Image (cartoon, rainbow, N blue to C red):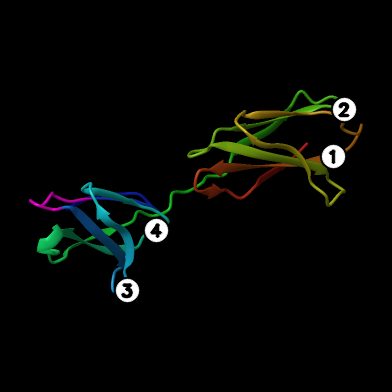
Amino acid sequence: ASTSVTYNSATLRWASVANAAGYDVDYRQNGGINWTNAATGLADTTVNISSLISSTLYEWRVRASCGVIGTSVYSTAQFTTAATPTCFTPTGLSATGITPTNATINWAAAVNAVSYDVDYKASASSTWINAATGTTSLSVNLTGLLHSTTYDYRVRTNCSFGNSSYTQAQF
């Protein structure tokens, strides 16, 4: 048996058995009481399981169903899911092209980033204004700003497995 494992999924593989009509596959956290069924009567010798907990030891078992002959005994194996990757915060925040009513917010690409969310507000305000949600750009233009006003802005990274905290700056 072999596995290909990420922080929240695993692909389980095993050798085929002569005369097998299908395979039954179950898994659970190591030492758990109840098994979770991953497949019943599966014709293939590979099954994918998802929604696993990161950094966790799992055990799994597979048996062959051989029609009228019956089923084999279970073969068991274990795997450990990887740690959850880090969704890093953006760095290098800067405001450029500042005029009395406009500014461009810039930041450096973050590791594992899929996109970014950007908000801004007048420093005296408690209400954030969304400037971009899910942008893949590394800059956002702000328009309609108030003359002689200090602004706060924040950027966070969106990853396939979650979001970073916001990184905040001011201009």
Q: Which numbered dot is residue 101? A: 2
List the residue tagged with mark 4: 52
Q: Which residue is more in the foreground, 156 or 39?
A: 39
Q: Amino acid at mark 2?
A: Thr
Q: Amino acid at mark 3?
A: Gly
Closer to the camera, 16 or 99? 16
Instruction: Report the side of 128 relative to 41 (left or right).
Output: right
Of circles 1 and 2, the one toward us is 2
Q: Which mark is residue 150?
A: 1
- For the record, the magenta segment spans 13-20
| Magenta highlight on residue 158 | no
Tell which of 8 and 96 is nearer to you: 8
Give the image location of residue 89, x and y in percent. Answer: 57, 44
Please, which residue is most extreme toward the left here?
18
Question: Residue 16 colored magenta?
Answer: yes
Amino acid type, label 1: Thr
User: Quick one: SS at disc 4?
Assistant: loop
Q: Which residue is mark 3?
A: 32
Element at label 3: loop
Please name the residue shown 81% across and 43% down the image: 121
Callout 4, which amino acid?
Leu
